[in-house]
Image: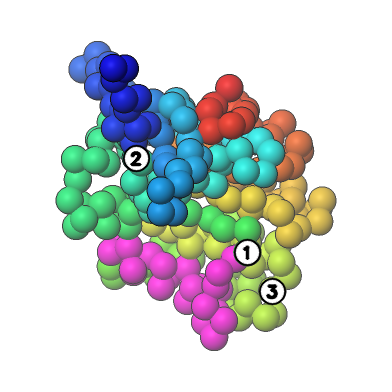
Amino acid sequence: MEAATPRLSSLYVEPERAPEDAEPPALELIDVFKIFRSGPAETVALRGLDLRVDQREMVAVVGPSGSGKSTMLSLAAAMDAPSAGDVRIGGRSLARMSEAELAELRADQIGVIFQSGNLWPTLSAEENVAASARLAGVGRDAGSESREALARFGLERRADHTPDRLSGGEQQRVAIAAVAARHPSIVFADEPTGELDAGNEATVLDVLRKLRDDYEAAVVIVTHSRTVAETCDRVVEVSDGRAL
């Protein structure tokens, strides 16, 4: 009688360890599977995906809809857990962290930028940035950090404006400033220019490069834009749940 084929969710291979004296990558996904279940049916969104992003590197992730890009981003940003494999931030395995440690990691080291700004509508630009910094535990320096971030991204004259008085590009720059004020080690941007025209897209790309250069963060951008991809240090294509 033939042995039963193991379910994909049961597969796991212990990843190789990097030399102890090497600088750990900002992000590693090692042989990652993600399986979604509905009753007896299984949908394999990621199938053995490997990805490495070095510190202070800007990487574009491209691929067709349904290829696994968004699933990969949610796992990398510690918003979901893989079915098998390992996700590491700064050399630390997320699988070995408690819920409290994961919450602290998300607040201290991970920034996420969405397609729309997701700003508090009744707060000014400066208050939005400061609130984000305080939620991450920046404390009494949140005000100065927010003013510095807004000035660095050319928004000092918009500091007292609420989102309804800002253009779409300015709102996105405020959202990026809110992430920058927390000084994360890695930033994930999900189609950050998807709702912007060419001029605002170029401005937001410049701001994302400042995150890499001035704040020394690794930046991972999920995008369909060829312009965005061509400005990054490296392009990774995701297809059928794997990184090519």
The image quarter containing residue 181 is bottom left
Q: Quadrant for the C terminus, please.
A: top right
Q: Quadrant for the N terminus, please.
A: top left
Q: For the point 54% across and 85% down, which residue is it?
A: 122
Please give left or right for residue 70 compared with residue 35 in the image.
Answer: right
Indicate which disc residue 116 carries. Answer: 1
Q: Is residue 166 above or below residue 235?
A: below
Please give left or right for residue 237 compared with residue 92 in the image.
Answer: right
Q: Is residue 235 above or below residue 189?
A: above
**Residue topped by disc 2:** 83
**Residue topped by disc 3:** 166
x, y percent for residue 35: 42, 42
**Marks 3,2: beta carbons within 8 A:** no
The kind of residue tagged 1 is Ser
Disc 3 crowd rating (10 Å Cα; few below 14, some 14-19, many 20+) is some
The verdict on residue 240 being magenta is: no
Q: Earlier along the polypeptide chain: callout 3 or callout 2? A: 2
x, y percent for residue 83: 34, 40
Q: For the point 73% across and 59% down, which residue is it?
A: 195
The kind of residue tagged 2 is Ser
Q: For the point 63% across and 77% down, which residue is it?
A: 163
Give me the C-alpha separation between circle 1 and circle 2. Answer: 29 Å
